[in-house]
Amino acid sequence: MANAHKYEDVVVTVSDRIGTIKLNRPKSLNAFGGNLMLDCVAGLRELNDHPDTVITVITGEGRFFSAGADVREQRAPEDPSSSPVSRKIAFMSRYTLAVEMLRSMIDHKKVLVVALNGPAVGGGAAWFPGVADILLASDSSYLQVPFSALGLVPEFGSAINFSQSLGVHRANEFLMFGRKLSAEELERWGLANRVFPAASFQQDVQRYLQEQLAVNDGKSMMEAKRLMNAPLRDGRLVAVQNAMDALSERFVEGAPYERFALKRKEMEEKSKKAKL
């Protein structure tokens, strides 16, 4: 196709009715930099319309699923003297791509499988698992969201998604206090469907999904997904917008900047020590 999207930071493949979107910035722990989010949206759109696939898998290359936003790219506004309204609109415009990525996952027609090949932090933990139809995890994976520690809020619908999946009190500890959830806890608490060994994770994921395709009708699985998600769809999209509004207000107030600066300094010091 002449106008096909040119992927730079994800790899999209199709094999045996399974489409896979692999986040491919392993040196940056698959953080949301470069073209990763744009590529992910394009991959979701391509596989949503693919005539031969039933399942879409989102996974990562390397030892991390995703480290979320790149702290090094979070800087104070160039014009801090601008009005709160101007700053809020500027911040909201930054989130257009993230909102479209969440909408693309929420409205995805295929069975959406998130395969945590490793740890997921921040947006990597908050955005994907909560909207997945099936969550598979390696035994090396964990989820952690340091939103409160960075002066942020639960991002893009994660508050409602995790309260529905984990229950309100467990979700509060995860989202408010930043509790790290191990793969074993994810399975025990019902968020992860299966946990596989890290050494054979990708092969185990493909084997498990092929077993489901061998005995289940593809259209029936997609219809089951549609019927289960239809009553949740509008609430999830409203939650995405509400979170974008709250997140923008936090940045207008300036709360995250000092915390991001401290985090960058901590990372730089660790990097210097590692080079010694």
Image (spheres, rainbow, N blue to C red):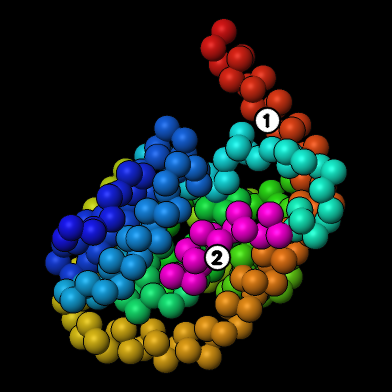
**x, y percent for residue 16:** 14, 66
Point out the image quarter for the N terminus: bottom left
Please tell me in which quadrant of the rendered image residue 158 appears: bottom right
Secondary structure, mark 1, is helix
Who's the residue at 36% across and 88% down the image? 224
Q: Is the stretch drawn in magenta largely helix, strand or loop?
A: helix
- 214 in relation to 158, above or below: below
The mark lying in front, picked from 2 and 1, is 2
Who's the residue at 28% across and 55% down the image? 5
Can residue 123 be seen at all in this image of the molecule?
yes
Who's the residue at 71% across and 33% down the image? 263
Left or right relative to 131: residue 150 = right
Instruction: Give, as a single range, the part of the protein colored magenta.
Output: 89-105
Q: Which residue is denoted by mark 1 in the rendering?
A: 264
- 178 in relation to 108, above or below: above
Left or right relative to 60: residue 51 = left
Q: Which residue is denoted by mark 2 in the rendering?
A: 99
Task: Assess disc 1: are there few (<14), some (14-19) or many (≥20) residues with their C-alpha within 10 Å of its C-alpha.
Answer: some
- 213 in relation to 77, above or below: below
Q: What separation in Å lies between label 2 and label 1 (alpha carbons)? A: 26 Å
Name the kind of residue labelled 1 in the image.
Answer: Arg
**x, y percent for residue 105:** 44, 70
Which residue reaches farthest top? 276
Q: Which mark is residue 118?
A: none
